[in-house]
Image (cartoon, rainbow, N blue to C red):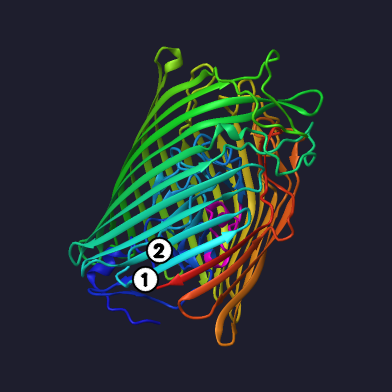
């Protein structure tokens, strides 16, 4: 273990830089390396809390695990956790997933946080991994701390932070479908009191889908400034751009999948790529009053937008081969301001948190479209597609709205050491929310709503042994529903209750076995009358069991394992069939990754593999039907070799056996095929 020289600054920076210690002139990494596991998570309580002391299931995907798994995509990383299922990704525009069966806002993709701030509102594209330090998967309702959200859980991304020790890493990779990627990670001191970090990545390539290509780039500079021994200021910027063709995938021909190849594109390349841009700023101030009390505050601003044309499947005709399509143009943009101030204290056996926060969000949406008609159908032959036909140019406005949201809240949390082996967590939050939607298609008609919500949570932990924790918890959450219905009406807010109990073990491996039950009301689903609008689905529920295991199971043999049984279904609804399963959520899913480190001629190397299993799922968001996505199993190989301390070569193969599978679906005409075999060779060099 490395020796650490503590200072008051170390206490001040602990919440900003987890797992690091800060002295007056150096930064030193502390502790013994914990392969594939972390002992604490900051997002669960907004304090540095041991996972064994949390009355909830929490999994941290560490930098080591993400590197060994060859992860460059946020969605691929989440497959390593239990109870997370892929959802329809809106033509490949953003990341979308469900936790314990609950997806999030269908208008913006699934909920996730970056350093504790929401980064999913708006149009932010597929998140890149270049500046991800670790990913915290926090199960159960988080509304008592973060306000609006899903009861299944939330993801908190912790970004890479500036270091006062110089480090410079360059990466170059090439892969299948003529894909190449360049990335850089540079950090070091600018002075005795200021350090910087710069993460950047550029990726472009073709696709396993016919005629398609994409390119993405991001840059993320950050800086930290030691204003004094007790105060620091830090700033981070994320700028991202994605250009990719809008792709609704393949279709099931009269309910049957596999009659056309997964590579077949049913849109039009003449539409050009859909452009997504997102720029985010985060500013944090930390101040340590004394060893017992500190202040942490932050501001966040994110602007985002999505613009471009698309050609989307509309209806398969009676001949079983002629597909009518709809052409659309979207110009969506959003602005998101957030801020918070929190006071933390440790009076006696209590660890208290007092906070206030708020946000303002503006969302402008303009959509034009033209439906196919019998007189001039905009069609394609799914078995012998011919691209480049005459495209509809006269598009009618179907959506023209501005939505504004305001939310303010205060919250209190207390973590109590009741006894040597008993701990409790109590928290409550009060939110005030307002929403105004202006519909320009109806002469500027406005729809307003206001609501208040109280979100409590409580949990208890009993530790009969220092390596074992038993816990139970309960909580409530809410989510205001965005958008307007087909008759310009606003929707009631979602509300839910969740209960969880489990056991944790901490030794050479970390493991959590959790059981839960969730009941949720006022869920939005597709309106089958007009797919541009949604409606409240009534009540849904989810109950299940999850197992997560990570650590070193033998000398230099690392394991990551997850399994989930998820029973998520409709409980009451006027449209959906009661008892129908929620779309894209399998009852059974599992993932395992094993990596062995060894020596080749005195040089470090690794070799391993993994398997991902996803069970059968309902394939239609709008209705509970007999259309199912079949279960699938994919395999991967991972390997690396380091001829010296500066150079690392890795070769990864995803979908090793080139399995044909379907990752998610929105309806029978919009089915997202899984990617074919992908081989990636990467060179990493540390200067």
Residue at the limit of the structure toward the left, as seen here: 228
Above or below for 546 versus 509: above
Q: Residue 192 versus residue 594: which sits nearer the camera?
A: 192
* SS for callout 1: strand
> In the image, is residue 72 part of the stretch drawn in magenta?
yes
Does any portion of residue 467 appear in the rendered image? Answer: no
Which label was assigned to residue 167? 1
**Residue at image mark 2:** 185
Q: Quadrant of residue 600?
A: bottom right
Residue at the limit of the structure toward the right, as seen here: 319
Quarter that holds the N terminus: bottom left
> In the image, is residue 204 part of the stretch drawn in magenta?
no
What residue span does the magenta drawing correspond to? 67-83
Q: Are marks 1 and 2 in contact (CB under 8 Å)?
A: yes
**Residue at position x 49%, y 18% in the image:** 488
**Residue at position x 72%, y 35% in the image:** 251
Lower sequence index among marks 1 and 2: 1
Mark 1 residue crowding within 10 angstroms, few (<14) / some (14–19) / many (20+): some
The location of residue 190, given as percent across then percent down, is 24, 66
Does any portion of residue 453 appear in the rendered image? Answer: yes
The location of residue 517, given as percent across then percent down, is 60, 47
The location of residue 60, given as percent across then percent down, is 50, 62
Q: Quadrant of residue 266?
A: top right
Above or below for 420 versus 566: below
């Amino acid at each position: 273990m490395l020796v650490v020289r503590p200072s008051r600054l170390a206490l001040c920076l602990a919440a900003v830089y987890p797992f690091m210690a800060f002295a007056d002139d150096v930064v030193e990494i502390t502790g013994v390396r914990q392969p594939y596991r972390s002992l604490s998570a900051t997002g669960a309580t907004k304090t540095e809390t041991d996972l064994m002391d949390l009355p909830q299931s929490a999994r941290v995907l560490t930098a080591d695990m993400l590197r060994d798994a060859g992860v460059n995509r946020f969605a691929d990383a989440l497959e390593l956790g239990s109870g997370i299922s892929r959802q329809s990704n809106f033509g490949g525009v953003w990341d979308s997933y469900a936790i314990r069966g609950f997806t999030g806002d269908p208008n913006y993709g699934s909920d996730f946080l970056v350093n504790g701030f929401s980064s999913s509102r708006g149009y932010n594209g597929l998140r890149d991994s270049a500046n991800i330090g670790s990913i915290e998967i926090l199960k159960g309702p988080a509304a008592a701390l973060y306000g609006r959200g899903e009861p299944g859980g939330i993801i908190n991304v912790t970004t890479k932070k500036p270091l006062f020790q110089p480090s410079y890493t360059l990466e170059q990779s090439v892969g299948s479908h003529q894909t190449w990627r360049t990335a850089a990670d540079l950090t070091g001191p600018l002075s005795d009191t200021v350090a910087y970090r710069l993460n950047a990545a550029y990726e472009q390539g073709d696709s396993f889908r016919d005629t398609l290509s994409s390119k993405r780039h991001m840059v993320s500079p950050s800086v930290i400034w030691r204003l004094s021994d007790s105060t620091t200021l830090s700033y981070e910027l994320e700028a991202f751009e994605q250009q990719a063709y809008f792709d609704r995938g393949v279709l099931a021909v009269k309910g049957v999948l596999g009659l056309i190849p997964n590579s077949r594109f049913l849109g039009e390349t003449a539409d050009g790529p859909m452009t997504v841009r997102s720029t985010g700023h985060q500013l944090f101030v930390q101040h340590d009053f004394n060893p017992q009390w500190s202040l942490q505050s932050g501001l966040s601003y994110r602007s985002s937008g999505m613009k471009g044309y698309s050609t989307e499947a509309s209806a398969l005709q009676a001949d079983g081969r002629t597909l009518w399509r709809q052409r659309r143009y979207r110009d969506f943009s959003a602005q998101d301001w957030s801020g918070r101030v929190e006071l933390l204290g440790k009076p006696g056996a209590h660890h208290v948190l007092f906070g206030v926060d708020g946000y303002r969000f503006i969302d402008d949406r303009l959509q034009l479209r033209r439906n196919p008609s019998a007189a001039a159908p905009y069609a394609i032959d799914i078995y012998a597609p011919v691209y480049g036909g005459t495209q509809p140019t006269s598009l009618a406005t179907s959506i023209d709205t501005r939505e504004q949201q305001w939310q303010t809240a205060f919250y209190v949390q207390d973590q109590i050491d009741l006894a040597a082996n008993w701990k409790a967590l109590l928290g409550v939050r009060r939110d005030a929310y307002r929403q105004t939607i202006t519909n320009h298609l109806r002469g500027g008609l406005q729809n307003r709503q206001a609501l208040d919500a109280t979100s409590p949570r409580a949990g208890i932990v009993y530790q009969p042994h220092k390596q074992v924790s038993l816990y139970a918890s309960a909580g409530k959450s809410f989510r205001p529903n965005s958008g307007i219905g087909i008759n310009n009406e606003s929707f009631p807010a979602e509300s839910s209750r969740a209960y969880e109990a489990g056991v944790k073990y901490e030794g050479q491996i970390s493991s959590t076995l959790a059981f839960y039950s969730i009941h949720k009301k006022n869920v939005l689903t597709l309106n089958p009358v007009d797919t541009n609008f949604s409606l409240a689905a009534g009540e849904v529920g989810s109950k299940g069991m999850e197992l997560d295991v990570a650590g070193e199971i033998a000398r230099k043999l690392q394991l990551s394992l997850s399994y989930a049984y998820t029973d998520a279904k409709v409980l009451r609804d006027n449209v959906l069939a009661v008892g129908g399963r929620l779309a894209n959520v399998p009852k059974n899913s599992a993932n395992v990754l094993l990596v062995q480190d060894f020596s080749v001629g005195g040089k470090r190397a690794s070799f391993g593999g993994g398997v991902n299993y996803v069970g059968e799922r309902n394939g239609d968001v709008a209705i509970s039907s007999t259309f199912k996505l079949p279960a699938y199993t994919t395999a991967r190989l991972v390997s690396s070799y380091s001829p010296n301390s500066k150079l690392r070569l890795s070769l990864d193969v995803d979908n090793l056996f080139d399995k044909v599978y379907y990752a998610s679906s929105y309806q029978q005409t919009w089915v997202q095929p899984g990617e074919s075999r992908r081989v990636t060779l990467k060179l990493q060099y540390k200067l």
